[in-house]
Amino acid sequence: MKKILVIVLFLLTTHYTFAQKLPEIEKKLNAVFQKINPENQSNPDYYDTLETANTQFEKLLLQYTASNRETLHYDFNALKKNGLIITTSEDGKFRIYSWDSWTGGTMHDFKNVFQYEGDKKVYSEATETENEGDGQSFYHQINDILSQNKKYYLAQNTAILSSGLSYHSIKVFSIDEAKLNHNAKLIKTQSGIKNQLGYEVDLTASSNRDNEITNYDIEYDPKNKIISIPLILDNSKITEKKIHYQFKGKYFEKM
């Protein structure tokens, strides 16, 4: 009985210690992240140290998110207030941290850190994700879905290529044997089973100059498991029509 009590007390103390460390971790991360904040552009050394600050923040974020599993569920409100975008899956096992590096000019270069749980451990990695556009995207929504008893994650992301040009995508991830699979395929198209759906929005195109359509984002209906993307014509005109893909038990298929 005494042995069991000691173990319980140890576990409670360990949990309390980790929880106590989280505000301290956020404070350290925020101190570096502040150096990236564009509000500090008046600092004469801002642009000279920007690349270094991004590298330092990425390394520090990777270090803490890979060594402390409590970070997977922590809010990091101070960091979010300063511009860090944190998107978490519905089951709480997959999270993406995105931020604007402010090194890309009108083409915004976002950085991403992927954190996930596998085999009751937490892992973290920084991966150069690819879009059809050249700019790095930021992730802003993750939805979970089961296909043949396997969990998949639908991650919506956006790349800002210029002031009027953007690329929108919904990408499929899965966690396979404690490894994050960036190329999981769950979307059935005419050309095969795909990892993502995406499209470019060009607001500078002549066909869109008098176009009052403002909703050109991807939409996901979790109840009916439907992905909706706007129908965009060959001349780049954004129409009010939508293309729908519904989950049919194994894949998302065009309706």
Image: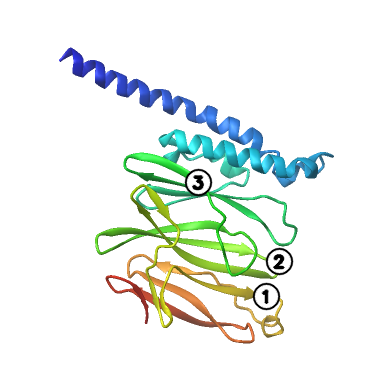
Number of numbered labels in the structure image: 3
Callout 3 amino acid: Glu
| Comes first in the chain, label 2 or label 1 | 2
Q: Which structural element holds mark 1?
A: loop
Residue hosting label 1: 203
Expressed as whole percent of the image width and height from the top left, the position of residue 31 reads 65, 33
Report, in whole angstroms, how far the alpha carbon at label 2 lies from the one at label 3: 27 Å
Which residue is at a point 44% across and 57% down the rendered structure image? 142
| CA gap, disc 3 and disc 1 | 34 Å
Q: Is residue 80 above or below residue 216?
A: above
Question: Quick check: 8 left or right of 240?
Answer: left
Q: Measured along the vertical axis of the image, is residue 28 above or below residue 201?
A: above
* Residue at 67% over, 75% down: 203
Considering the numbered disc 2 on the image, is that residue within a helix, a strand or a loop? loop
Residue contact between numbered discs 2 and 1, judged by CB atoms under 8 Å: no
Identify whether 34 is placed above or below 133.
above
Can you tell which mark lies on residue 125?
3
Lower sequence index among marks 2 and 3: 3
Residue type at tag 1? Leu
Q: Crowding near pointer 1: few (<14 within 10 Å), some, many (20+)?
A: some
**The one of 130 and 227 positioned closer to us in this rendering:** 130
Residue 126 screen position, x and y as percent: 54, 48
Q: Picture coordinates of residue 120 (x, y %)?
A: 32, 40
Mark 3: few/some/many CA within 10 Å (<14, 14-19, 20+): some
Q: Which mark is residue 162?
A: 2
